[in-house]
Amino acid sequence: MSDTKINPDSPVASRQVLEMLTVANDFCMFLEKEEVIPKDSLLKYLQKVLPLIYLKASLLPEIIPSDEDAIEHYVTGEQWEDLFNLIRSTLGSDDEYYMVDTGEHSHHDPVKASIAENIADIFQDLKDFVLLYQKPMLAFKENAVRDCRNLFETRYGYCIVNAHKAIHYLLYIPDTGQDYADI
């Protein structure tokens, strides 16, 4: 079998992987639009897409790559920061929220978090997945799926859950005249 031709029965060509790739690509393309996304549109999109990303990522198969060195990262610190600043600017004072980090065992005091930071982290992991998967060699696709699954379990899955709760609150909080960050 040629490295550029993927067996349709390969786990990297499974329905679960292709569906995750489709959702991840849509998410990245939405956030890469040239124009500024209105706050309400951004929140409504994220409200719908984040649970879908969570579901699709949780269904990714466990893959052991044939070559663990066939991996590349594409999103630069500058790209991450540009997206972070754009989202933070769009959300304004609603960007910040408080959460209890259950992974931190020394205390359970609320800590300040950022929707923009969560979304930029998710974007970075998913954009790297999409771009690495597009490489023609099987080993790149295997690493893309493995990393996407591992990063879901250890990083961006938490970002999704935390950001989604804050977004839900912003969309459905009764108008009290207070900013979300002040509550």
Image (tube, grey):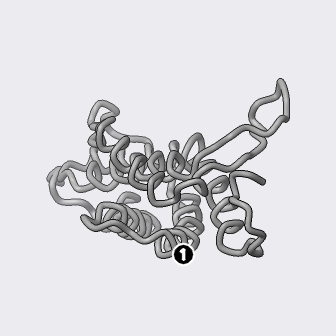
- Compared across the picture, whether 6 is left or right of 157 comes to left
Residue 65, how many percent across, how many down?
A: 37, 41
Residue at the image position 49 percent from the left and 53 percent from the top: 119
Which quarter of the figure is the C terminus placed in? bottom right
Residue at the image position 26 percent from the left and 36 percent from the top: 70
Residue 139: name its quadrant: top left
Pick the residue in front: 177 or 112.
177
Task: Identify the residue at the far top of this view.
Answer: 106
- Compared across the picture, whether 16 is left or right of 173 comes to left
Residue 73, how many percent across, how many down?
A: 30, 38
Q: Is residue 70 above or below residue 62?
A: above
Task: Identify the residue at the far front of this view.
Answer: 177
Amino acid type, label 1: Lys
**Number of disc labels:** 1
- Compared across the picture, whether 157 is left or right of 22 comes to right
Residue 125, how many percent across, how many down?
A: 42, 47
Residue at the image position 15 percent from the left and 54 percent from the top: 4
Residue 83, how many percent across, how many down?
A: 37, 50
Residue at the image position 76 percent from the left and 30 percent from the top: 104
Q: Name the residue under label 1.
A: 44
* Residue 15 visible in this rendered orientation of the protein: no
Q: Is residue 26 above or below residue 137?
A: below
Residue 48: name its quadrant: bottom right
Which quarter of the figure is the N terminus placed in? bottom left
Pick the residue in front: 4 or 24.
24
* Residue 104 visible in this rendered orientation of the protein: yes
Secondary structure, mark 1, is helix
Q: Residues within 10 Å of mark 1 (few under 14, many from 20)?
A: few
- Compared across the picture, whether 112 is left or right of 44 comes to right
